[in-house]
Image (tube, rainbow, N blue to C red):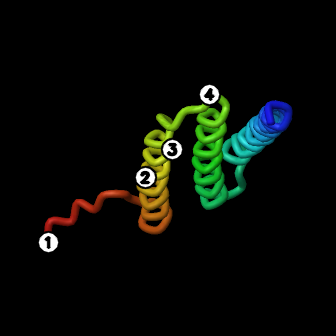
């Protein structure tokens, strides 16, 4: 049983390292898309994808250090990502985020 457990831990360690490298490469490519994006909509999509990758990276860190304390951080990133997506969409649609119309 201990041999199977050690093999499983080794596989888990290798897979998490490969996933961290993959997410890091994805973050670099998305950063390039934000800087050199042809349109603002492309930049907004890249920002959303960066947020999702950060959530995945936090989950991988939680797996690596064997804790559940980062679940709150993952949820907080998701909530902030949702609010940011709505703000960016409103800005792209109307040009302002908060309307100061006092009619």
The dot on residue 74 is 3
Does residue 96 appear in the picture of this structure?
A: yes
> Is 8 on the left or on the right of 45, as rendered?
right
Specify the label residue 76 is tagged with: none
Q: Residue at x 59, y 38 (%)?
A: 58
Q: Position of residue 43 (x, y in %)?
A: 63, 53
Residue 79 location in percent, x, y?
43, 52
- Kindly identify which residue carries mark 1: 103
Q: Which residue, given by chain and number where applicable, does mark 2 sit on?
A: 79
Quadrant into which the N terminus falls: top right
Residue 93 or residue 81, whichever sits in front: 81
Q: Assign the C terminus to one quadrant of the image.
A: bottom left
Q: Considering depth in this image, is 59 or 101 the residue closer to the camera?
A: 59
Q: Earlier in the sequence, mark 2 or mark 4?
A: 4
**What element does badge 1 sit on?**
loop
Asked if the residues shown at circle 2 and circle 1 are in contact, with their CB atoms under 8 angstroms apart, the answer is no
Q: Residue at x 64, y 36 (%)?
A: 63
Question: Rounded to the nearest whole Å, what is the CA distance between mark 2 and mark 3?
Answer: 9 Å
User: Element at badge 3?
Assistant: helix
Distance, label 3 to label 1, CA atoms, is 40 Å
Mark 2–mark 4 Cα distance, whole angstroms, equals 24 Å
Where is residue 81? Give x, y as percent.
49, 51
Q: CA distance from mark 4 to mark 3?
A: 15 Å
The reply to whether the C-beta atoms of the residues labelled 4 and 1 are less than 8 Å apart is: no
As drawn, 80 above or below 13: below
- Which-is-in-front pick, marks 2 and 3? 3
Q: Upstream in the sequence, badge 3 or badge 1? A: 3
């Amino acid at each position: 049983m201990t041999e199977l457990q050690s093999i499983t831990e080794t596989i888990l360690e290798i897979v998490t390292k490969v996933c961290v490298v993959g997410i890091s490469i994805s973050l670099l490519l998305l950063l390039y898309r934000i800087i050199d994006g042809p349109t603002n909509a492309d930049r907004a999509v890249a920002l959303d994808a960066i947020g999702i990758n950060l959530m995945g990276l936090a989950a991988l860190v939680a797996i690596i250090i064997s804790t559940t304390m980062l679940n709150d951080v993952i949820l907080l990133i998701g909530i902030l990502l949702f609010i940011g997506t709505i703000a960016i969409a409103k800005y792209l649609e109307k040009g302002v985020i908060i309307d100061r119309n006092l009619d």
